[in-house]
């Protein structure tokens, strides 16, 4: 399954993380224009390539006062985000500040804090990368994820519900999640999950049948007008007019497939991964044989990710966290062609090397990094055979799930 995650009223929610007095009341974030960057006051240039933005952002350090939105005695400003409480009053994105205050004079008005928004967006993405194999940041407050081979379709709804709850507990950010077989159906589903919910599409044709065309992401006003003139009013109508859309050429074919949920577009990461890891917390375990078994289980999942990314790690890392909250770790650097058996051998060795205490364990973390192409020539032939075997196993797991094939030592005695 593909999932789409959309932070609810993100800019307002970001301020509420640090100011609980803003909860449960009409709040708007209002912007005038970007002229501040040209004025003679301090600004900060932030390098934001690592997160939602793709360049540097200039953030004003000017101290604003109440006159900020006044110009020649007139109120200036546009609402860029409104809380759901404000939306219920009719105050939406694009409403002028003057109109918003006429609707509700006691409205709480906030200035944008782009540094805050970026910081929270980046932290959330890093968190999602631990929880989901593939994460694509679509905008500062939207993400796509691919659960294929990671979570069984039958468990996708519960997984996303737990994920939503965990995001709230960790970040105090409300988020809505749509689930479907395709990216764009999942994105459409998110609008039915809002606010702060989860919505799963199992039968695409039935789901899209009566949805107005303007609700679909990618159908703007120009295309909407063109379609309505032809009598195509719903997404169900779109499905019934395949030849018409195909007559548009590539853009029409792409739109038609997206609407019908048959686009097969992948979730694409926009940055090169520097490491891949997996960690799990659990009730305290004392039995070392059971802990090694759990290391092997985590290796199976980690191997799936490495093979999916087609990477060859040379740095292996393992961390143990004990019941007294102390931790111990070990690592090693090895130039070999990656395969699951090698991973299990290395991580088992690292576990025994790191396990310094005769104490219960509550968490295990495994990671690989420093991806290279070259390998040790002395082991190359053996590793190549194992790698070919791993690729065959990967195909089976991709189709039937990571648990479709497991080694004997992973099974409970």
Image (cartoon, rainbow, N blue to C red):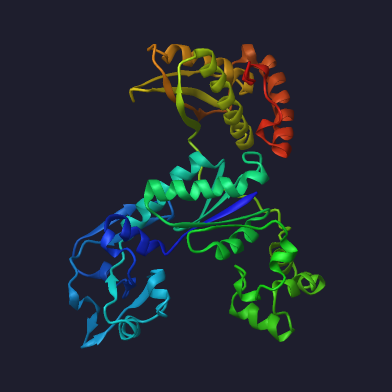
Image position, residue 104 (x, y; %): 31, 81
The answer to whether residue 162 is left or right of residue 19 is right
> Residue at point 70% right, 37% down?
398
Q: Is residue 230 above or below residue 213?
A: below
Work out which quarter of the rendered image holds the C terminus and state it.
top right
> Residue at point 40% right, 78% down?
91
> Residue at point 32% right, 79% down?
77
Q: Is residue 148 above or below residue 70?
A: above
When asked about the image quadrant of residue 211, the answer is: bottom right
Residue nearest the viewer, comparing 136 with 18? 18
Image position, residue 57 (x, y; %): 34, 58
Is any atom of residue 50 visible in this view? no
When asked about the image quadrant of residue 355, the answer is: top left
Q: Is residue 141 above or below residue 275?
A: below
Q: Is residue 370 above or below residue 40?
A: above
Residue nearest the viewer, comparing 353 with 252? 353
Image position, residue 262 (x, y; %): 74, 58
Is any atom of residue 202 visible in this view? yes
Question: Which residue is at the far right?
Answer: 243
Image position, residue 90 (x, y; %): 42, 80
> Residue at point 26% right, 78% down?
106
């Amino acid at each position: 399954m593909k999932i789409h995650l959309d932070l609810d009223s993100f800019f307002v929610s970001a301020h509420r993380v640090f100011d609980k007095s803003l909860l449960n009341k009409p709040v708007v974030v209002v912007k005038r224009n970007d002229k501040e960057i040209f004025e003679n006051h301090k600004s900060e240039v932030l390098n934001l390539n690592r997160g939602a933005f793709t360049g540097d952002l200039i953030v004003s350090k000017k101290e604003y006062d109440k006159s900020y939105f006044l110009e020649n005695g007139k109120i200036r400003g546009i609402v860029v985000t409104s809380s759901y409480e404000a939306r219920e009053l009719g105050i939406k994105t694009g409403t002028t500040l003057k109109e918003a205050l006429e609707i509700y004079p006691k409205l709480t008005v906030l200035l944008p804090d782009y540094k805050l928004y970026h910081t929270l967006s980046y932290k959330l993405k890093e968190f999602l990368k631990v929880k989901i194999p593939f994460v694509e940041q679509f905008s500062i407050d939207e993400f796509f994820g691919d659960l294929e081979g990671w979570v069984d379709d039958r468990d996708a709804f519960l997984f996303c519900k737990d994920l939503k709850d965990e995001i709230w507990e960790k970040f105090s950010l409300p988020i809505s999640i749509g689930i479907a077989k395709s990216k764009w159906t999942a994105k459409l589903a998110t609008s039915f999950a809002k606010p702060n919910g989860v919505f799963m599409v199992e039968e695409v044709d039935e789901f899209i049948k009566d949805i107005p065309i303007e609700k679909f992401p990618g159908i703007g006003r120009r295309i909407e007008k063109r379609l309505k003139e032809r009598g195509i009013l719903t997404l169900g109508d779109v499905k019934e007019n395949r030849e018409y859309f195909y007559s548009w050429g590539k853009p029409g074919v792409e739109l038609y497939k997206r609407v019908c949920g048959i686009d097969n577009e992948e979730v694409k990461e926009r940055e090169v991964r520097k490491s891949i890891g997996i960690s799990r917390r659990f009730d305290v375990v004392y039995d070392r044989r059971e802990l090694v078994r759990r290391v092997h289980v985590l290796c199976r999942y980690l191997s799936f990710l490495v093979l999916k990314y087609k990477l060859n790690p040379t740095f292996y890392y393992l961390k143990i966290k004990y019941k007294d909250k102390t931790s111990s770790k070990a690592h090693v650097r090895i130039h070999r062609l990656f395969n699951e058996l090698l991973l299990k051998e290395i991580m088992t060795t690292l576990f025994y090397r790191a396990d310094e205490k005769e104490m219960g364990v509550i968490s295990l973390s495994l990671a690989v990094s420093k991806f290279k192409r070259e390998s040790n020539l002395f082991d190359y032939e053996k590793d190549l055979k194992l790698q070919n075997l791993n690729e065959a196993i990967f195909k089976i797991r991709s189709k039937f799930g990571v648990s479709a094939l497991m080694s004997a030592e992973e099974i409970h005695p």
